[in-house]
Amino acid sequence: MDLGARSLAKKANIVVGVDIGSSKVCVLIAGVRPTEEQTATSLGTNGGHPALECMGVGVADSKGLRKGLIVNLEAAKVAVERALEQAEDVAGVAVEFALVGVAGAHIRGVNSRGGIALGTRPRDVQREDMQRAIDSARGVSLPEDRVVLHVFPQEFFLDGQDNIRQPVGLLGQKLEANVHIVTASATAEQNLVSALNLAGIKVSGTVLEPFAAAEACLSPEEREQGCCLLDLGAATTEMIVITDGVVRHTAAIPVGGDHFTNDLAVGLRTPVPEAEALKREHACVFRELLRGDSPIEISSVGGRPPRTVFSRMLTDIAEPRATELLELVHAELEHGGLDSRIGAGVVLTGGGARLRGLPDLVERLFGVPVRLGRPRGIARVPEEFAHPEFTVAAGLALYGHRAQAGAGQQSRSAGWRQKWKDVWKG
């Protein structure tokens, strides 16, 4: 790309999300829509006109990853470069900064509580007091190989009064905060950053992937009523539970789409690529959807002649694995005391969400509404990318735009405060 285009990219108001998964790498470039209608309230799925529009998407087969972790840095770098080049060519800009998603079995989530004294006499709670209470709650000891990805405030307590969302301006002497802390392997996160740096991208932030997916596909009503989002990747399934508008629980379950593929390969004695194609085209994890028992010709291993299997055989293999995964999800919900708090149901994202019959099986086992999550909140997303497996990349862009807008509002607020100080000094 020539220097003129690269210079243009520096001036353009763009946000970039990079999703490095075990099966694919996706880069999505989005630009802020130049309309007067856009406000902070129109971000994500909050309604109104989308504040972002898609400029380009690039996808490449993922290399150098195993079980969600980078094991070959050079191969991962090449995969990122290929996806990046595709997105840049379509968008007509060169990417300098990007947000990258973090996922994998190394993710841990924990709830914590901490508080501060406001003084010997009741006084108004200030915004700085909120942050000090949050800092107190996040002050848990971590092993040296762990890093904090996010600290999500849940609610505040003021002199025993609970479930306060916004304590600023209230009178009290002791302020406490409940938070949800998400941590990751420090080396796993750094390897992601290194792969992007080698591909010529500076990382502006790392974001938990199911949280990014939630940015792109959960409605305000689902967040309030309680929703469990499952991001079914190739190696792992990440989950996030949001109720009352705040993050309550996060977890990573070491079962993903590749496990279904491997089960089919072993059970049907067929090569893995053939098993992957069978999974996508014929597998069903909810036997009540089967109509008849259709014959399917498949390849054999070791150069043996093709064989014929039947569709019900695929279900006999895939349905138990899906049931196992959902039982692990339900155990996580019960462990967090949230199994009865997801009134809005379950949203499925990621490539594994497209397994035929999975929404029906979830609805049968959990007894709640279920839907597929597709990227929303970004205009002009090409139809071929408006699917569950691209939700994380879209959510990263939305998250980045919301962070930029929030930083801009804080900067403007700080600027006005300084101006008023100068006026009073004068």
Image (cartoon, rainbow, N blue to C red):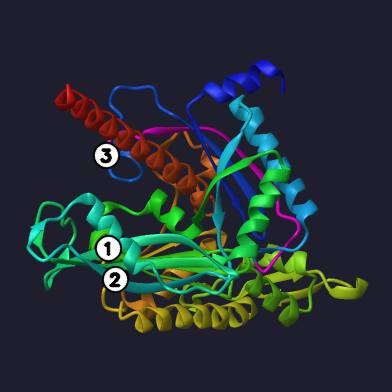
Q: Reading the chain from its start, which is encountered first: label 2 or label 1?
A: 2
Q: Position of residue 388 (x, y in %)?
A: 50, 54
Q: Which residues are magenta?
A: 47-67
Disc 3 element: helix
Residue 63 sits in which quadrant? bottom right
* In this rendering, the label closer to the viewer, 3 or 2: 2
Specify the quadrant that holds the N terminus: top right
Q: Position of residue 84 (x, y in %)?
A: 67, 39
**Which amino acid, by three-letter code, is at mark 3?**
Thr
Q: Between residues 240 and 411, which one lies in front from this camera angle?
A: 411
Q: Reading the chain from its start, which is encountered first: label 3 or label 2?
A: 3
* In this rendering, the label closer to the viewer, 1 or 3: 1
* Residue at mark 3: 41
* Residue at mark 1: 133
* Number of the label disc, if any, that sits on residue 409: none
Q: Position of residue 9 (x, y in %)?
A: 58, 24
Q: Residue at x 68, y 66 (%)?
A: 278
Disc 1 element: helix
Task: Answer whether labels 2 and 1 touch (C-beta < 8 Å).
Answer: yes
**Which amino acid, by three-letter code, is at mark 1?**
Ala
Q: Between residues 124 and 177, which one lies in front from this camera angle?
A: 124
Inspect the magenta stretch and tell me whether residue 54 lies in it: yes
Task: Answer whether labels 3 and 2 touch (C-beta < 8 Å).
Answer: no
**Which amino acid, by three-letter code, is at mark 2?**
Gly
Q: Residue at x 60, y 82 (%)?
A: 316
Residue 64 vertical position relative to residue 241 in the rendered view, above or below = above
